[in-house]
Amino acid sequence: MSPKNGKNKESDGSSEMVDATPSTDLLRAMGKFQRVLVTGGAGFLGRHLCRRLIRDGHEVICLDNYFTSQKKDIEDLIGHKNFELVRHDVTNPMQFEVDQIYNLACPASPVHYQYNAIKTCKTSFMGAMNCLGLAKRVKARVLQASTSEVYGDPDRSPQEESYWGNVNPIGVRACYDEGKRVAETMFFAYHNQNDVDIRVVRIFNTYGPGMHPFDGRVVSNFIMQALRNEDITIYGDGSQTRSFCFVDDLIEAFVRMMAQEDDVGPINIGNPNEFTIKELAETVLSLIPESKSKIKYLPLPGDDPQQRKPNINRARKVIGWEPKIQLKEGLSQTIAYFKNLDMSRYKKPTEHTAHENTEKQSKKRKLNDSDGESS
Protein backbone atom coordinates (compact mmCIF):
# COMPACT_ATOMS: atom_id res chain seq x y z
CA MET A 1 0.00 0.00 0.00
CA SER A 2 1.04 3.62 -0.44
CA PRO A 3 2.89 5.13 2.55
CA LYS A 4 0.70 6.88 5.11
CA ASN A 5 1.96 9.79 7.19
CA GLY A 6 5.13 9.66 5.11
CA LYS A 7 6.20 6.22 6.37
CA ASN A 8 6.12 2.65 5.23
CA LYS A 9 7.72 -0.11 7.28
CA GLU A 10 9.98 -2.33 5.20
CA SER A 11 9.46 -6.08 5.28
CA ASP A 12 13.12 -7.05 5.60
CA GLY A 13 13.71 -5.43 8.96
CA SER A 14 15.66 -2.43 7.71
CA SER A 15 14.83 1.12 8.69
CA GLU A 16 11.43 2.63 8.00
CA MET A 17 11.04 4.29 4.63
CA VAL A 18 10.44 8.02 5.10
CA ASP A 19 9.35 10.29 2.25
CA ALA A 20 11.71 13.07 3.28
CA THR A 21 13.04 13.77 -0.22
CA PRO A 22 11.81 16.47 -2.59
CA SER A 23 8.71 15.59 -4.59
CA THR A 24 9.02 13.89 -7.96
CA ASP A 25 7.83 17.07 -9.69
CA LEU A 26 10.47 19.13 -7.91
CA LEU A 27 13.24 16.65 -8.73
CA ARG A 28 12.12 16.67 -12.37
CA ALA A 29 12.21 20.46 -12.42
CA MET A 30 15.70 20.42 -10.89
CA GLY A 31 16.86 17.95 -13.54
CA LYS A 32 17.66 15.34 -10.86
CA PHE A 33 14.67 13.04 -11.30
CA GLN A 34 15.41 9.66 -12.89
CA ARG A 35 13.22 6.84 -14.17
CA VAL A 36 15.16 3.73 -13.20
CA LEU A 37 14.92 0.07 -14.20
CA VAL A 38 16.26 -2.46 -11.69
CA THR A 39 16.55 -6.01 -13.05
CA GLY A 40 16.53 -8.62 -10.31
CA GLY A 41 14.75 -5.95 -8.32
CA ALA A 42 12.94 -8.33 -5.95
CA GLY A 43 16.16 -10.08 -4.94
CA PHE A 44 18.28 -9.40 -1.88
CA LEU A 45 20.28 -6.49 -3.31
CA GLY A 46 17.56 -5.41 -5.72
CA ARG A 47 14.89 -4.63 -3.15
CA HIS A 48 17.34 -2.68 -0.98
CA LEU A 49 18.26 -0.67 -4.08
CA CYS A 50 14.61 -0.12 -5.06
CA ARG A 51 13.81 1.24 -1.60
CA ARG A 52 16.82 3.54 -1.68
CA LEU A 53 15.89 4.92 -5.10
CA ILE A 54 12.27 5.46 -4.01
CA ARG A 55 13.49 7.28 -0.89
CA ASP A 56 15.63 9.47 -3.13
CA GLY A 57 12.50 10.46 -5.08
CA HIS A 58 12.99 8.51 -8.31
CA GLU A 59 10.53 6.36 -10.26
CA VAL A 60 11.48 2.69 -10.17
CA ILE A 61 10.56 -0.22 -12.44
CA CYS A 62 11.36 -3.43 -10.57
CA LEU A 63 11.80 -6.38 -12.94
CA ASP A 64 12.14 -9.96 -11.68
CA ASN A 65 11.22 -13.54 -12.62
CA TYR A 66 11.09 -14.64 -8.93
CA PHE A 67 13.55 -17.52 -9.39
CA THR A 68 15.24 -16.82 -6.05
CA SER A 69 12.77 -14.25 -4.70
CA GLN A 70 9.04 -13.78 -4.31
CA LYS A 71 6.58 -10.96 -4.76
CA LYS A 72 5.96 -10.81 -1.04
CA ASP A 73 9.58 -9.78 -0.49
CA ILE A 74 8.84 -6.36 -1.92
CA GLU A 75 5.18 -5.95 -0.95
CA ASP A 76 5.92 -2.81 1.09
CA LEU A 77 6.56 -0.92 -2.17
CA ILE A 78 3.56 -2.24 -4.10
CA GLY A 79 1.08 0.61 -4.47
CA HIS A 80 3.68 3.34 -4.05
CA LYS A 81 3.10 6.02 -6.69
CA ASN A 82 6.73 5.83 -7.89
CA PHE A 83 7.00 2.05 -8.03
CA GLU A 84 6.10 -0.45 -10.75
CA LEU A 85 6.59 -4.22 -10.46
CA VAL A 86 7.01 -6.28 -13.65
CA ARG A 87 7.38 -10.06 -13.86
CA HIS A 88 9.85 -10.69 -16.67
CA ASP A 89 12.92 -12.77 -17.46
CA VAL A 90 15.97 -10.80 -18.61
CA THR A 91 16.82 -13.47 -21.16
CA ASN A 92 13.93 -11.99 -23.17
CA PRO A 93 14.14 -8.50 -24.74
CA MET A 94 12.75 -5.53 -22.77
CA GLN A 95 10.92 -2.42 -23.91
CA PHE A 96 10.99 0.46 -21.41
CA GLU A 97 11.69 4.17 -21.46
CA VAL A 98 14.19 4.82 -18.68
CA ASP A 99 17.14 7.03 -17.73
CA GLN A 100 19.12 4.46 -15.78
CA ILE A 101 19.39 0.66 -15.63
CA TYR A 102 20.85 -1.43 -12.82
CA ASN A 103 21.44 -4.99 -14.05
CA LEU A 104 21.32 -7.14 -10.89
CA ALA A 105 19.53 -10.16 -12.38
CA CYS A 106 21.34 -13.44 -11.74
CA PRO A 107 21.30 -16.04 -8.96
CA ALA A 108 24.39 -15.36 -6.84
CA SER A 109 24.49 -18.27 -4.39
CA PRO A 110 26.22 -21.52 -5.44
CA VAL A 111 23.22 -23.67 -4.51
CA HIS A 112 21.05 -21.50 -6.78
CA TYR A 113 23.35 -20.87 -9.74
CA GLN A 114 24.48 -24.50 -9.87
CA TYR A 115 20.86 -25.70 -9.86
CA ASN A 116 20.60 -24.86 -13.57
CA ALA A 117 24.02 -23.99 -14.94
CA ILE A 118 22.76 -23.38 -18.48
CA LYS A 119 20.12 -20.94 -17.25
CA THR A 120 22.76 -19.14 -15.18
CA CYS A 121 24.97 -18.73 -18.27
CA LYS A 122 22.03 -17.44 -20.30
CA THR A 123 20.96 -15.00 -17.59
CA SER A 124 24.45 -13.49 -17.39
CA PHE A 125 25.06 -13.25 -21.13
CA MET A 126 21.61 -12.63 -22.60
CA GLY A 127 20.56 -10.47 -19.64
CA ALA A 128 23.56 -8.24 -20.18
CA MET A 129 22.94 -8.11 -23.94
CA ASN A 130 19.27 -7.16 -23.48
CA CYS A 131 20.07 -4.47 -20.90
CA LEU A 132 22.76 -3.04 -23.16
CA GLY A 133 20.45 -3.11 -26.19
CA LEU A 134 17.84 -1.20 -24.23
CA ALA A 135 20.42 1.29 -22.94
CA LYS A 136 21.67 1.87 -26.47
CA ARG A 137 18.15 2.46 -27.78
CA VAL A 138 16.99 4.89 -25.07
CA LYS A 139 20.45 6.35 -24.29
CA ALA A 140 20.30 5.25 -20.65
CA ARG A 141 23.20 4.81 -18.28
CA VAL A 142 23.51 1.13 -17.33
CA LEU A 143 25.31 -0.50 -14.39
CA GLN A 144 26.49 -4.11 -14.41
CA ALA A 145 26.55 -5.78 -10.99
CA SER A 146 29.58 -7.96 -11.58
CA THR A 147 31.34 -9.98 -8.91
CA SER A 148 34.60 -10.81 -7.20
CA GLU A 149 34.11 -14.28 -8.72
CA VAL A 150 35.65 -12.91 -11.93
CA TYR A 151 38.95 -13.25 -10.04
CA GLY A 152 38.32 -16.98 -9.47
CA ASP A 153 40.68 -18.52 -6.92
CA PRO A 154 43.17 -15.64 -6.87
CA ASP A 155 46.92 -16.11 -6.56
CA ARG A 156 47.36 -12.61 -5.16
CA SER A 157 45.76 -10.68 -2.32
CA PRO A 158 44.21 -8.19 -2.11
CA GLN A 159 42.64 -8.28 -5.55
CA GLU A 160 42.86 -5.07 -7.56
CA GLU A 161 40.80 -4.34 -10.67
CA SER A 162 43.74 -4.82 -13.04
CA TYR A 163 44.12 -8.45 -11.95
CA TRP A 164 42.88 -10.84 -14.68
CA GLY A 165 42.00 -13.65 -12.30
CA ASN A 166 42.50 -17.41 -12.00
CA VAL A 167 39.27 -19.06 -13.14
CA ASN A 168 38.49 -22.65 -14.07
CA PRO A 169 36.31 -22.28 -17.21
CA ILE A 170 34.77 -25.76 -16.90
CA GLY A 171 34.46 -26.16 -13.12
CA VAL A 172 31.29 -26.37 -11.05
CA ARG A 173 31.37 -22.59 -10.47
CA ALA A 174 32.15 -21.69 -14.09
CA CYS A 175 28.53 -21.01 -15.09
CA TYR A 176 28.54 -18.04 -12.72
CA ASP A 177 32.21 -16.99 -12.85
CA GLU A 178 32.52 -17.08 -16.64
CA GLY A 179 28.98 -15.78 -17.10
CA LYS A 180 29.90 -12.65 -15.19
CA ARG A 181 33.19 -12.33 -17.03
CA VAL A 182 31.56 -12.46 -20.45
CA ALA A 183 28.92 -9.96 -19.25
CA GLU A 184 31.75 -7.53 -18.47
CA THR A 185 33.16 -8.18 -21.95
CA MET A 186 29.76 -7.35 -23.46
CA PHE A 187 29.50 -4.13 -21.45
CA PHE A 188 32.85 -2.85 -22.62
CA ALA A 189 32.20 -3.96 -26.20
CA TYR A 190 28.98 -1.92 -26.27
CA HIS A 191 30.79 1.00 -24.63
CA ASN A 192 33.75 0.97 -27.02
CA GLN A 193 31.82 0.20 -30.21
CA ASN A 194 28.49 1.98 -29.62
CA ASP A 195 29.39 4.54 -26.94
CA VAL A 196 26.85 3.10 -24.48
CA ASP A 197 27.12 4.84 -21.10
CA ILE A 198 28.17 1.97 -18.80
CA ARG A 199 29.27 1.50 -15.19
CA VAL A 200 30.72 -1.78 -13.87
CA VAL A 201 31.18 -2.72 -10.23
CA ARG A 202 32.62 -5.96 -8.83
CA ILE A 203 30.76 -7.00 -5.70
CA PHE A 204 32.48 -8.88 -2.91
CA ASN A 205 30.58 -10.92 -0.29
CA THR A 206 27.55 -8.94 0.87
CA TYR A 207 25.16 -9.70 3.71
CA GLY A 208 22.42 -8.10 5.81
CA PRO A 209 18.69 -8.07 6.54
CA GLY A 210 16.66 -9.35 3.62
CA MET A 211 18.83 -12.37 2.82
CA HIS A 212 16.96 -15.54 1.96
CA PRO A 213 17.31 -17.89 4.97
CA PHE A 214 18.11 -20.87 2.73
CA ASP A 215 20.20 -19.27 0.00
CA GLY A 216 23.29 -21.29 0.89
CA ARG A 217 25.54 -18.28 1.48
CA VAL A 218 27.94 -18.58 4.37
CA VAL A 219 26.47 -15.80 6.54
CA SER A 220 22.86 -16.95 6.24
CA ASN A 221 23.95 -20.59 6.64
CA PHE A 222 25.81 -19.96 9.88
CA ILE A 223 23.11 -17.75 11.42
CA MET A 224 20.25 -20.11 10.58
CA GLN A 225 22.20 -23.14 11.82
CA ALA A 226 23.07 -21.37 15.07
CA LEU A 227 19.47 -20.25 15.65
CA ARG A 228 18.25 -23.82 15.07
CA ASN A 229 20.98 -25.39 17.24
CA GLU A 230 22.23 -27.33 14.23
CA ASP A 231 25.86 -28.10 13.42
CA ILE A 232 27.57 -25.15 11.73
CA THR A 233 28.98 -26.60 8.53
CA ILE A 234 32.36 -25.35 7.39
CA TYR A 235 33.66 -26.57 4.03
CA GLY A 236 37.36 -27.34 4.26
CA ASP A 237 39.35 -26.48 7.41
CA GLY A 238 37.92 -22.96 7.71
CA SER A 239 41.20 -21.21 6.93
CA GLN A 240 39.90 -19.74 3.67
CA THR A 241 39.17 -16.02 3.98
CA ARG A 242 36.35 -13.73 2.95
CA SER A 243 35.59 -10.02 3.29
CA PHE A 244 32.01 -9.17 4.26
CA CYS A 245 30.28 -5.95 3.18
CA PHE A 246 27.01 -4.85 4.80
CA VAL A 247 24.21 -4.31 2.29
CA ASP A 248 23.56 -0.63 3.13
CA ASP A 249 27.19 0.19 2.39
CA LEU A 250 27.00 -1.64 -0.92
CA ILE A 251 23.85 0.20 -2.05
CA GLU A 252 25.48 3.52 -1.23
CA ALA A 253 28.35 2.54 -3.54
CA PHE A 254 25.91 1.64 -6.34
CA VAL A 255 24.24 5.04 -6.17
CA ARG A 256 27.53 6.91 -6.04
CA MET A 257 28.91 4.94 -8.99
CA MET A 258 25.91 5.86 -11.14
CA ALA A 259 26.05 9.53 -10.10
CA GLN A 260 29.69 10.19 -11.06
CA GLU A 261 30.79 11.08 -14.59
CA ASP A 262 34.51 10.25 -14.56
CA ASP A 263 34.96 6.47 -14.53
CA VAL A 264 33.08 3.56 -16.12
CA GLY A 265 34.87 0.99 -13.97
CA PRO A 266 35.31 -1.78 -13.17
CA ILE A 267 35.54 -0.82 -9.49
CA ASN A 268 35.73 -3.21 -6.54
CA ILE A 269 32.98 -2.79 -3.95
CA GLY A 270 33.54 -4.65 -0.71
CA ASN A 271 34.90 -4.50 2.82
CA PRO A 272 38.70 -4.90 2.89
CA ASN A 273 38.70 -6.37 6.42
CA GLU A 274 39.48 -10.07 5.99
CA PHE A 275 38.21 -12.95 8.16
CA THR A 276 38.65 -16.69 8.00
CA ILE A 277 35.47 -18.72 7.64
CA LYS A 278 36.20 -20.26 11.05
CA GLU A 279 36.42 -16.77 12.58
CA LEU A 280 33.05 -15.93 11.04
CA ALA A 281 31.48 -19.06 12.56
CA GLU A 282 32.94 -18.24 15.98
CA THR A 283 31.70 -14.64 15.75
CA VAL A 284 28.17 -15.77 14.89
CA LEU A 285 28.17 -18.16 17.86
CA SER A 286 29.40 -15.39 20.16
CA LEU A 287 26.48 -13.19 19.08
CA ILE A 288 23.96 -16.01 19.68
CA PRO A 289 25.16 -17.19 23.13
CA GLU A 290 22.08 -19.36 23.66
CA SER A 291 22.96 -21.54 20.65
CA LYS A 292 24.04 -25.12 21.29
CA SER A 293 25.57 -25.49 17.82
CA LYS A 294 28.96 -27.09 17.24
CA ILE A 295 31.25 -26.62 14.24
CA LYS A 296 31.29 -29.48 11.71
CA TYR A 297 33.80 -29.74 8.86
CA LEU A 298 32.88 -31.02 5.37
CA PRO A 299 34.92 -31.52 2.16
CA LEU A 300 35.86 -28.34 0.34
CA PRO A 301 33.92 -27.80 -2.95
CA GLY A 302 35.86 -27.57 -6.20
CA ASP A 303 37.36 -24.19 -7.17
CA ASP A 304 36.35 -22.64 -3.83
CA PRO A 305 38.50 -19.50 -3.50
CA GLN A 306 41.06 -19.53 -0.70
CA GLN A 307 41.14 -15.74 -0.38
CA ARG A 308 38.76 -12.88 -0.97
CA LYS A 309 39.96 -9.38 -0.11
CA PRO A 310 39.23 -6.34 -2.27
CA ASN A 311 41.60 -3.52 -2.95
CA ILE A 312 39.18 -0.56 -2.76
CA ASN A 313 41.62 2.28 -3.51
CA ARG A 314 39.76 3.10 -6.74
CA ALA A 315 36.41 3.19 -4.93
CA ARG A 316 37.88 5.62 -2.40
CA LYS A 317 39.30 7.81 -5.16
CA VAL A 318 36.52 7.72 -7.77
CA ILE A 319 33.33 7.68 -5.67
CA GLY A 320 34.64 8.69 -2.25
CA TRP A 321 33.39 5.44 -0.75
CA GLU A 322 34.43 2.95 1.87
CA PRO A 323 32.29 0.73 4.10
CA LYS A 324 31.13 2.12 7.43
CA ILE A 325 29.42 -0.87 9.07
CA GLN A 326 31.83 -3.49 10.38
CA LEU A 327 31.21 -7.20 10.83
CA LYS A 328 29.91 -7.49 14.39
CA GLU A 329 27.48 -4.59 13.98
CA GLY A 330 26.24 -5.92 10.65
CA LEU A 331 25.90 -9.48 11.94
CA SER A 332 23.91 -8.24 14.95
CA GLN A 333 21.41 -6.55 12.62
CA THR A 334 21.24 -9.62 10.39
CA ILE A 335 20.71 -11.98 13.33
CA ALA A 336 17.89 -9.79 14.64
CA TYR A 337 16.27 -9.96 11.19
CA PHE A 338 16.46 -13.76 11.04
CA LYS A 339 15.13 -14.12 14.60
CA ASN A 340 11.97 -12.23 13.62
CA LEU A 341 11.51 -13.84 10.21
CA ASP A 342 8.24 -15.58 9.36
CA MET A 343 9.67 -18.91 8.21
CA SER A 344 6.31 -20.04 6.81
CA ARG A 345 6.99 -17.76 3.84
CA TYR A 346 10.01 -19.75 2.70
CA LYS A 347 10.44 -23.11 1.05
CA LYS A 348 12.39 -25.90 2.67
CA PRO A 349 16.16 -25.55 2.41
CA THR A 350 17.89 -26.26 -0.86
CA GLU A 351 20.34 -29.09 -0.20
CA HIS A 352 23.88 -27.76 -0.02
CA THR A 353 25.57 -30.18 -2.39
CA ALA A 354 28.36 -28.07 -3.85
CA HIS A 355 31.04 -30.51 -2.64
CA GLU A 356 29.01 -33.46 -3.98
CA ASN A 357 28.68 -31.73 -7.36
CA THR A 358 32.45 -31.40 -7.44
CA GLU A 359 32.95 -35.09 -6.65
CA LYS A 360 30.44 -36.17 -9.32
CA GLN A 361 32.06 -33.96 -11.96
CA SER A 362 35.52 -35.29 -11.06
CA LYS A 363 34.36 -38.93 -11.30
CA LYS A 364 32.70 -38.25 -14.67
CA ARG A 365 35.90 -36.73 -16.06
CA LYS A 366 37.97 -39.67 -14.83
CA LEU A 367 35.53 -42.07 -16.47
CA ASN A 368 35.69 -40.15 -19.77
CA ASP A 369 39.49 -40.11 -19.60
CA SER A 370 39.67 -43.87 -19.01
CA ASP A 371 37.26 -44.50 -21.91
CA GLY A 372 39.48 -42.42 -24.16
CA GLU A 373 42.58 -44.33 -23.16
CA SER A 374 40.97 -47.71 -23.80
CA SER A 375 39.58 -46.84 -27.22
Image (spheres, rainbow, N blue to C red):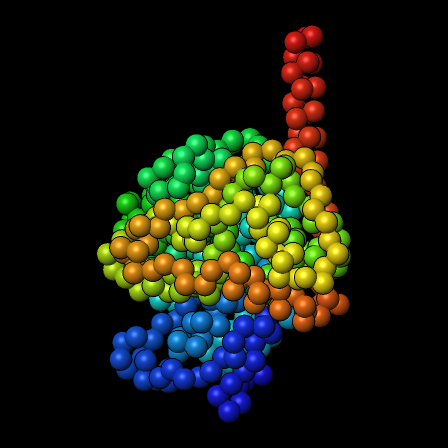
Relative depth, front residue between 221 and 190:
221
Q: In which quarter of the image is residue 65?
A: bottom right
Give residue 101's position: percent from left, percent from top.
41, 61
Residue that extends furthest to the left in the rendered view of this protein: 262
- Residue beneath the point at 66% across and 62% down: 288
Residue that extends furthest to the bottom in the rendered view of this protein: 5
Give residue 75's position: percent from left, percent from top.
60, 75
Residue 92 in sight here: no
Relative placement, left or right, of 243 versus 317 is right
Q: Quadrant of the C terminus?
A: top right
- Residue beneath the point at 47% across and 47% down: 274
- Does residue 365 lie above or below 38 as drawn? above
Q: Quadrant of residue 122?
A: top right
- Does residue 127 lie above or below 41 as drawn? above
Q: How many labels does the image show?
A: 0
Give residue 309's position: percent from left, percent from top.
44, 45
Relative placement, left or right, of 52 versus 341 is left
Residue 20 in sight here: yes
Relative placement, left or right, of 267 versus 152 is left
Relative depth, front residue between 250 and 173:
250
Give residue 292's position: percent from left, percent from top.
75, 56
- Residue beneath the point at 41% across and 50% down: 272
Q: In which quarter of the image is the N terminus?
A: bottom right
- Residue beneath the point at 72% across and 59% down: 291
